[in-house]
């Protein structure tokens, strides 16, 4: 057998291995996805001692399905899409509920949000239906959009389920620019505005049922 053939075979294998190694290093890396949050809210405040309190139980919220997950929903005319390289750190519905809890903690009024596992007896039951939570391109896909948040809040007396109030709260906040950072800031501002209105509304209804 000629000694040339095994040498050629070895060179061919080495060449293929080098080629494969080159292919591995040339595969483009995936772009990192930015993670964002909203509704950090203000710091909790101390409630005055001896003041009547209103215990509020939040029933399960409903959230617009298209925006409930971790993707940022956009609307341009009649077309819906998601921001490609941005995600919420948790589903928007979860972040919204967490923001609601912080809003009640930061409100100096008599209303206090309680969990289902707490011993305290509820005075009021609050139900929220988040109907819109979206980025709307009202002036075209290249202009700075506005964030639209709309929530229906229903308040019932816990003892007999009497309706205390049923109201729509909404906010529209224009982003500072057509970039993810300013859009997220607009979500934060719109959410804070809506939740502040809801906590104030609940607090105003509270004296009639306060202990």
Image: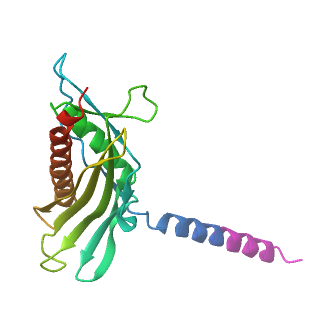
Relative to residue 45, is residue 101 depicted above or below?
Answer: below
Q: Which of 189 and 160 lies nearest the eye of the viewer? A: 160
Residue 10 at what x, y percent from top left?
A: 73, 69
Q: Is 65 in front, or is 53?
A: 53
Quadrant housing residue 66? bottom left
Q: Main secondary structure of the magenta part?
A: helix
The residue shown at (26%, 75%) is: 75
Camera-nearest residue between 96 and 62: 62
Position in image of residue 119 (x %, y %): 43, 25
Identity of the residue drawn at 57% across and 65% down: 21
Quarter of the N terminus within the rendering:
bottom right
Name the quarter where the C terminus is drawn: top left
Q: Is residue 54 left or right of residue 117?
A: left
Write the start and end of the magenta stretch as one range.
Answer: 1-14
Camera-nearest residue between 51 and 20: 51
Q: Is residue 179 visible?
A: no
Figure check: 169 above or below 200:
below
Q: Quadrant of residue 147?
A: bottom left
């Amino acid at each position: 057998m000629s000694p040339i053939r095994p040498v050629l075979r070895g060179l061919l294998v080495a060449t293929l291995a080098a080629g494969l190694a080159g292919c591995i290093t040339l595969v483009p890396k995936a772009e990192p996805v930015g993670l964002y949050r909203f509704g950090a809210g203000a710091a909790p405040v101390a409630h005055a001692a001896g003041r009547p309190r209103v215990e509020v139980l939040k029933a399960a919220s409903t959230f617009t399905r298209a925006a409930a997950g971790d993707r940022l929903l956009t609307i341009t005319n009649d077309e819906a899409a998601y921001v490609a390289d941005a995600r919420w750190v948790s589903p928007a519905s979860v972040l919204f509920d967490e923001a609601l809890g912080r809003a009640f903690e930061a409100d100096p009024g008599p209303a206090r949000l309680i969990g289902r596992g707490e011993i305290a007896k509820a005075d009021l039951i609050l139900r929220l239906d988040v109907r819109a939570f979206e980025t709307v391109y009202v002036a075209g896909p290249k202009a700075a959009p506005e964030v639209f948040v709309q929530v229906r809040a229903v308040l019932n007396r816990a003892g007999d389920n009497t309706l205390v109030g049923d109201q729509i709260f909404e906010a529209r906040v224009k982003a500072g620019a057509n970039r993810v950072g300013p859009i997220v800031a607009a979500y934060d501002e719109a959410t804070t505005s809506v939740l502040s209105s809801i906590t104030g509304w609940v607090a105003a209804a509270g004296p009639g049922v306060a202990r």
